Image (tube, rainbow, N blue to C red):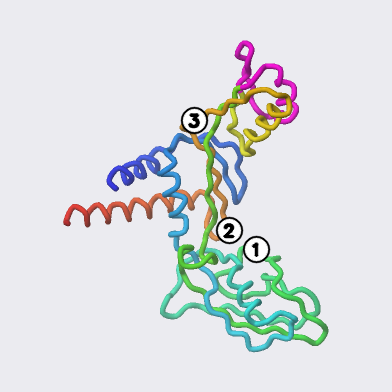
Amino acid sequence: MAVLRKRAVEEEEGLKMKIIEKKPNQIVFITEMEETLANSIRRYVNQIPVVAIDEVEISRNDSPLYDETIAHRIGLIPLKNKSLNEKKPEKLKLKSNKEGIVYSEEIKGEPEVVYKRIPITILGKGQELEIIATPKVGKGSEHAKFTPGLMFYRNVVEITTDKSLYDDIKKACPKSEIKDKGQKITVIDDKKQEIADVCEGIGKRKGKKVEIDYTNKLVITLESFGQTGVGDILKKSIEILKKDMTSISKKIAKA
């Protein structure tokens, strides 16, 4: 436990990374990290507190969908993460009588929805939908609606094969770095899209041996569902992991 806590501290204080791709809700990077620690951080993404709709009161539903289906859809709509008064949470309201698709932007109140154009149901002429929803702070370990995002990873691999496959591999993987090593070539699979299977397939078709060596570097992908910034997901996951490891270490020391 103490070793894992120490590693988590080191990662937060000095995580060396090489960015492969960065988008508003996604980041892909390479870093040196043990898989056990990366897996612990991944699991702790579901320990980050997130706001989501927990209770739905439907007073009018003329749409073709059952109340339970609409309640389930509304519960999964991401809300902007903010502190809530747990004793007296604010109510969100949805009231629509227009013909056509009812979108998430019609949910009014605080906290606001992250994405405005999520379809909820469809109404015909003269039909109505009226809902009051209550948000709650929860964790992804309790229910998927409280999950802030995803983290997944794989090893960076070195692919070594016969030099005669150079043109085929270059054509299939134009962005990959290919190094010439005498009668063989080495491809470093360190991009967002994994190419090891592609190279193995080419080698199998050509009757050439393909060797794959796993390195101690990881390609890590972090995705945010919008409630929390993608950078904050990694930071908060490590912080909560550190806190739990400290607590467990103290209990073990007292035992």
The CA distance from mark 3 to mark 1 is 39 Å
Tag 1, which secondary structure?
Answer: loop
Are circles 1 and 2 on residues that touch, CB within 8 Å? yes
- Residue at 54% x, 56% y: name it: 149
| Crowdedness near tag 3: few (<14), some (14–19) or many (≥20) residues, C-alpha within 10 Å | few
Magenta residue check for 165:
yes
Tag 2, which secondary structure?
Answer: loop
- Name which of mark 2 and mark 3 comes first in the sequence: 3
Question: Where does label 1 land, which residue?
Answer: 115
**In the depicted structure, whether residue 201 falls above or below residue 161:** below
Q: Farthest residue in the front direction?
A: 207
- Give the side of residue 166 with respect to residue 91, left or right: right
- Residue at 50% x, 67% y: name it: 143
The CA distance from mark 1 to mark 2 is 8 Å
Question: Where does label 2 land, which residue?
Answer: 226
- Give the side of residue 118 with respect to residue 242, left or right: right
The CA distance from mark 2 to mark 3 is 32 Å
Which amino acid, mark 1? Answer: Tyr
Instruction: Point out residue 97 in the picture as x, y percentages from the top left corner.
Output: 75, 83
Q: Which residues are magenta?
A: 161-186
- Residue at 73% x, 86% y: name it: 62
Magenta residue check for 40:
no
Q: Nearer the viewer, residue 196 or 3?
A: 196
Which amino acid, mark 2? Answer: Gly
Instruction: Point out residue 166 in the picture as x, y percentages from the top left corner.
Output: 70, 20
Q: Nearer the viewer, residue 149 or 203?
A: 203
Which amino acid, mark 3? Answer: Thr
Position of the C terminus, as image quadrant, is: bottom left
Question: Where does label 3 land, which residue?
Answer: 215
